Image (cartoon, grey):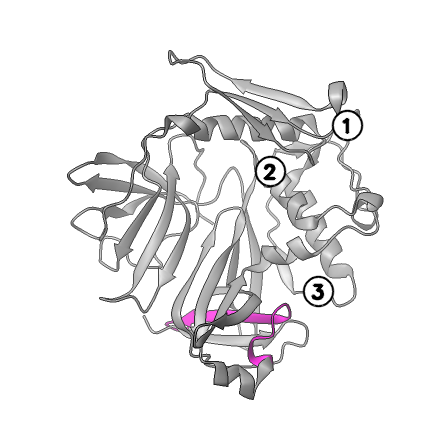
Amino acid sequence: MTARVFTQHALTGQWLALNLPLADLEYGPEVNGPGTLSGKLAPRLLSENPTLADPGTTCIYVEDDGEIRWGGIVWDVRTQGSDLALEAASWSSYLQHRYDMDGNLGGRGPYTYTDRCKVVRDIWAYAQSVPDGDLGVTVDPTTSTSTIGTPADPLKFLAWEAPNLGDAVDDLVSGDATPEYTCTTAWNATRTDVVKRIRLGWPRLGARRTDISFASGVNIIEDPEIALAGDEYAQVVIALGAGDGSAKRRQVSAVRNGRLRLETVLDLPDIKGNDVLATRAGAERAWRQVLGTVDQVTIRDTSAARIGSWQIGDDVYTRVHNAWTDYTGWCRITGWTIKPHAAGGPQAVISLKPADSYQYGSAA
């Protein structure tokens, strides 16, 4: 891998640095989140031209083999010993710095029995309609049958509460049977500018892959940690939402499965909708009922799974065998970090979750 890092002014589109020499480069996406990039830069480069990576208004990209593999916004540049440490996050991180100042997304809401994908698109449309707020992000036209809001409890964005737009998107995609998203970046047809995209997936992102695999002794290069943590286990989740006292929203997701009953409380004080609260409780319970999973593997580039051959949400057959572990099963990719300059060659640190509880759609 020969990664090239370059930067661009977020508003004007002006190219700033065409080959930014970042050391210790790491980058990658995630499901329902922006994904991150980090690296280190010699101080003299920024002292000579501070606009190369001006936090909060600079886009940064990683290109490999002529294709853009990652794009996002520089958010933090600070001294770290004799270097400058740079951190960035992809497009959805922008919404964490934006708020609904007009109410109901500038008149697009309130929402009753509305497709969650539409609300996500409306949030982005509102954010980018404000002067100096157009980041140039496009959102997939995906539709779903997952709706939000009822006549008795419509989804509203109240101007006097100044709801955070990033949190609003998180609430829409964080439960069971809700759409998913990830951030992608690519060259446009003429390779003169970039396409910044929010990929929406329904019923989920990714697909079950039979052409690649992760396996000890093949491409897994470190023994992954597998935890059996009873402290985190629960088959009863009590989700608490907005309100006080007896008016506080409350939803419970519970099952009986022959194990000692264990409970946990999920505190979500900003959630007003009972339907959203219920889906969050169900998702939390599904996660807490699984013990002994493989959460992360580090792989090298081999024919078993070439780096970059998978997508967010893909299920990959995973085999981990060592002195402590004998694990075999389908695992879902929820994110990864590429280390193009790792010792011994490029590596990918891949975050995983059990795949059996997900529905399967075609790859986008």
Alpha-carbon span between mark 1 and mark 3: 31 Å
- Front-lying residue, 74 or 363: 74
Q: Position of residue 123 (x, y in %)?
A: 71, 50
Quick check: marks 3 and 2 in contact, CB under 8 Å?
Answer: no
Residue type at tag 3: Asp
Instruction: Kindly state the secondary structure of the residue where label 1 is placed.
Output: loop
Alpha-carbon span between mark 3 and mark 2: 26 Å
Report the residue marked by disc 3.
Answer: 134
Instruction: Kindly state the secondary structure of the residue where label 3 is placed.
Output: loop
Q: Which mark is residue 144?
A: 2
Magenta range is 51-66
- Front-lying residue, 137 or 261: 261
Alpha-carbon span between mark 2 and mark 1: 20 Å
Please tell me whether residue 94 belongs to the stretch shown in magenta: no
Residue type at tag 2: Ser
- Front-lying residue, 307 or 287: 287
Q: Position of residue 32 (x, y in %)?
A: 53, 46
